[in-house]
């Protein structure tokens, strides 16, 4: 596959080899891209994981809440590549009070951290990468469908709704510079972030029963491939969009098993 031949892609959000970003970086390299990574916090761990990619990729430190890191990002990336054709935002964080716990009692400080890290950061990353994208390109984020309320997802759900809106405003403001901004809206995948969602196992069980194509929570490949497609030249006229990669879950009001039961009841 040479979908990303000659493209320079910045991938954020690897912390383990289960991270969606790890699989996206792997798929991007397999599609011919040169990949540069950013890591948050445990950089030695990220560097170790980076060695497991088909080609080891350099790692730059980036805490999206740290303005100095954001201001220095373009220069740090230039040490490895002379520009960027694409950026993957694969970042989310919520304190325990905001994810699970009581939606009604979560304090503003924790909501603010959640929204800053998980939604505002898409804007921060886009602005930081802008000096490297003078020829246009593609920015892709990772979403969990925020058009409805979920058990336990709470303020992370609100942050994802903000992320969806940030995507549309960035699409508006960066479109004239030839930059597309889109989200891959993924079904549940077993990662470190997912483990911090109380009741994640209920979500994963319910998902595979309802999704018409089925859904494997231990296979991030379909999500990674969708990210590669959006980073490529295959979607030149798509911006401000959410691409659903969830086995078709979002399209059904009832699960296939519930539909079969209802049909059997009628017969
Ligand atoms: N796993 C799922 O079920 C699922 C489903 C839909 C969307 N997503 C989204 O995919 C993205 C990646 O999550 P994942 O599931 O691969 O989990 P993950 O834990 O592997 O990745 C989350 C990443 O966010 C990074 N991060 C947290 N705070 C940061 C900060 N201040 N600055 C920079 N980076 C920071 C972490 O270091 C980590 O690499 C997230 O946006 C998540 O919400 C995940």
Image (spheres, rainbow, N blue to C red):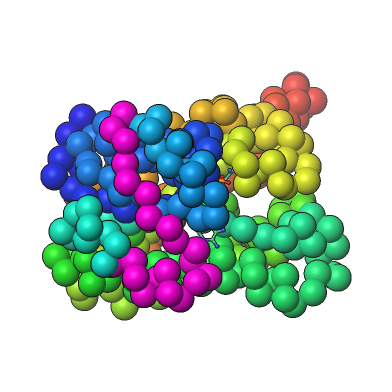
Where does residue 157 sit, x and y in percent of width and height? 65, 60
- Find out whether residue 71 is within the magenta segment: yes
The magenta stretch is 54-74
Side of 177 relative to 183 (left or right): left
**Quarter of the figure with residue 34:** top left
Relative to 251, is 107 on the left or the right?
Answer: right
At x 46%, y 76%, the residue is 67
Is residue 185 in sight in this rendering?
no
Quadrant the C terminus occupies: top right
In this orientation, which residue lies closer to the viewer: 44 or 230?
44
Percent across and percent down for residue 209 are 67, 29
Residue 204 placement, left or right of 36:
right
Q: Is residue 144 visible?
A: yes
List x then y, in percent, for residue 31: 24, 35
In the image, what residue occupies the spot 62% across and 46% down?
A: 193
**Placement of the N terminus among the 4 image quadrants:** top left
């Amino acid at each position: 596959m040479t979908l990303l031949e000659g493209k320079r892609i910045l991938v954020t959000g690897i912390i383990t080899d289960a991270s969606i970003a790890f699989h996206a970086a792997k798929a991007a390299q397999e599609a011919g891209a040169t990949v540069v990574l950013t890591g948050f916090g445990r950089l030695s761990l990220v560097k170790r994981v980076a060695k497991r990619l088909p080609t080891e990729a350099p790692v730059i430190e980036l805490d999206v809440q740290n303005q100095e890191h954001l201001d220095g990002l373009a220069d740090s990336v230039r040490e490895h590549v002379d520009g960027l054709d694409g950026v993957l935002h694969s970042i989310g964080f919520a304190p325990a009070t905001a994810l699970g716990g009581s939606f009604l009692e979560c304090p503003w400080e924790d909501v603010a951290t959640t929204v800053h890290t998980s939604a505002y950061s898409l804007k921060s990353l886009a602005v930081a990468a802008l000096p490297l994208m003078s020829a246009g390109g593609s920015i892709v984020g990772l979403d969990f469908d925020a058009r409805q309320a979920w058990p336990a997802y709470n303020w992370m759900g609100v942050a994802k709704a903000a992320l969806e809106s940030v995507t549309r405003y960035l699409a508006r403001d960066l479109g004239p510079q030839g930059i597309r901004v889109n989200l891959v809206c993924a079904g549940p995948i077993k990662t470190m972030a997912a483990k911090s969602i109380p009741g994640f196992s209920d979500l994963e069980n319910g998902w595979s029963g309802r999704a018409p194509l089925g859904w494997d929570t231990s296979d991030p490949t379909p999500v990674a491939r969708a990210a590669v497609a959006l980073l490529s030249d295959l979607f030149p006229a798509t911006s401000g969009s959410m691409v659903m990669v969830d086995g078709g879950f979002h399209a059904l009001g009832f699960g296939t098993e519930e539909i079969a039961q209802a049909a059997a009841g009628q017969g």
